Amino acid sequence: MSIAVLIEHHGGQVSRPSLEALTLARALGTPVAVWLGDEPPADAVAQLGEYGACEVRVAVIGDDARLPAKAATAVAAASADTSVLLVISTFVNKEIVTRVAMSTGAGVVVDAAGAELVDGRIETTQTVFAATWDVRTRIETDRAIVGIRPNTTQATSAPVAGDATVVGVEVPLPETRERLAAVEPVPEEDGVPLAEAPVVVSGGRGTGGDYTLIRDFAELLGGAVGASRDATDEGWISHEHMVGQTGTTVTPALYVACGISGAVHHRGGMQASGTIVAINMDPDAPIFEISDFGVVGSLFDVIPQAIERIEAHRES
Amino acid sequence: MRILVTVKHTPDLQSQRSFTDGAVTRTAEDGSMNELDENAVEAALQLVEAAGEGEVYALTVGGADAVAAVRKALQLGAHHAIHVNDEAIAGSDVFGTATVMAGAVRKVHAETPLDLVITGMAALDGLTSMLPTALAAELDWSQLTLASGLTVADGEATIVRHLPDARETVSAPLPAVVSVTDEANTPRYPNFKFIMAARKAPVATWTLADLDIDPSAVGASAARTTVVDASERPPKANRQVVTDTGDGGTALADFLIERGLA
């Protein structure tokens, strides 16, 4: 059974969650990579093969990939002969798959943490209600679309590489009423994108606007920098860093919340993280209720000491 | 300017929020609209106020309790309220819900044309932010989603949307379905005059028959997915909270090292 995987790429590089999705696809059937935008570089194609893609179907549609109705047409054409379509569960991909589902009749689950074949149907697992409940859902239709969250599958290369044969997808795109008037790229920061990061260190009101220690700690742990809504509203850090139900949802192996009280909207964006650690002055902060390890204290005392200890441990 | 806003009745998440909002105390009754829909109502009211004319319709789909969501919209200043309630709708997936909402939008639009449908960016009780796209596709109207800014001029709507990799400006002719984020505006608080008026304001109650929708096209039997198991997650075991008395950072580091996380 062919499993289509919509590949996320930045500057010609395949994103790590896409490799996770290919790994998951191998457990369900034979992965077929779908690439929208500009032509993939040869090393990206090779990497997709390394993770099991037997084909790389390329629709060269440039910035039209940004308009959901056009992207959906390309994705539907590229995945027409497959029974399962896997995408990374981003806001934009949710728009694309909604339209693919409406044109193909496929059933959809987004924000999934896993997917498996049970009696010929796809069943997914996900957490809902701000990660306080686990839900298993069966997709009842012959065609299934699953939006998978980053960091939910360990990406591993295939025991036997796929051929990664590049196949061009020629598809007439529909005229859309929507037109892109401007696209202003967000300057790329060093390090991993927030949604994909295996470690996230976030700062909130308790930072007072000083993110130096948060950045230092994130760098030490190989993670990305996050923030609470309070901090982005104050203009201390840009909106792209906001973790929460209306910002970026993250599911890293380790989430470190510094000076964040843990309002329900913030928890909804990070509660499914593997291990949660919190530093907060207020012993009654709700973040402690969902933390594996909490320190009641000032992040300005705790973080430098923790950094020192970890550095000493690594040197020893 | 005629705008329809979709609002959803959600379980009361707001009880915690009302503490942080300081002076304002919200009752259980007015805490019953999905909080992100307040941004949609606000966007609609601001456009009508700026235009100096127009009307805002609030639409909700759901059982008897759902009427609280449109009452909240009336308290905020919406002019008309519509509640679609039909037993056959229960258990609908996003596509069924979009079918019902599109039917209600078409009915309003047929009487007097609408310029916009505005929705919130997601429902905070677990829906998936797929509805605005599904509604635009179902209606075959322009889709302008995840707007953190919205302007309307010369028969066209323009939005700004912040995506992780880019800030896009997207324009499309009216009528359009627009979803707004919580960055788009700061919702107003209910106005006392409107609160009093909302108690007596009529709410149009429609069934699927009023919308000419085949009941078998919606509801649980038409849903493409089935929840086969749902269980509450156990609270985290072995939680540790220490108070920093000079070695809190070391304790935290040791925890991370032990777990192989540092």
Image: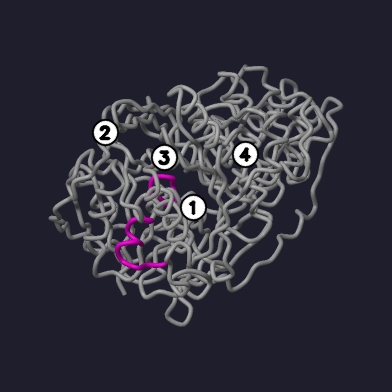
Main secondary structure along the magenta-highlighted residues: helix
CA gap between label 3 and label 4 equals 20 Å
Q: Is residue A158 visible?
A: yes
Label 4 crowding class (10 Å Cα cut-off): few <14, some 14-19, many 20+?
A: many
Q: Residue at point 63% right, 34% down?
A: B76
Q: Which mark is residue B178?
A: 3
Q: Residue A180 carries which label?
A: 2
Label 2 crowding class (10 Å Cα cut-off): few <14, some 14-19, many 20+?
A: some
CA gap between label 2 and label 1 equals 27 Å
At label 3, which amino acid type do we have? Answer: Val
Chain part drawn in magenta: A88-107
Rendering coords of residue A129 (x, y %) = 64, 53
Q: In this view, does B8 lie to the left or right of A296?
A: left
At label 2, which amino acid type do we have? Answer: Leu
The image quadrant where one finds the C terminus of chain A is top right
Label 1 crowding class (10 Å Cα cut-off): few <14, some 14-19, many 20+?
A: many
Rendering coords of residue B137 (x, y %) = 34, 53
The residue under label 1 is: A149
Q: Residue at point 49% right, 41% down?
A: A195
The residue under label 4 is: B74
Using the image, determine if residue A100 lies above or below residue B38: below
CA gap between label 2 and label 4 equals 35 Å
Q: Residue A250 carries which label?
A: none
Give the chain letter at badge 4: B
Q: In this view, does A1 lie to the left or right of B246?
A: left
Q: Residue at point 76% right, 32% down?
A: B250
Q: Is residue B108 magenta?
A: no
Question: In the depicted view, which residue is nearer to us: B107 or A129?
Answer: B107
Please tell me how many numbered marks the rendered image carries. Answer: 4
Q: Residue at point 47% right, 69% down?
A: B218
Mark closer to the chain start, 2 or 1: 1
At label 1, which amino acid type do we have? Answer: Arg
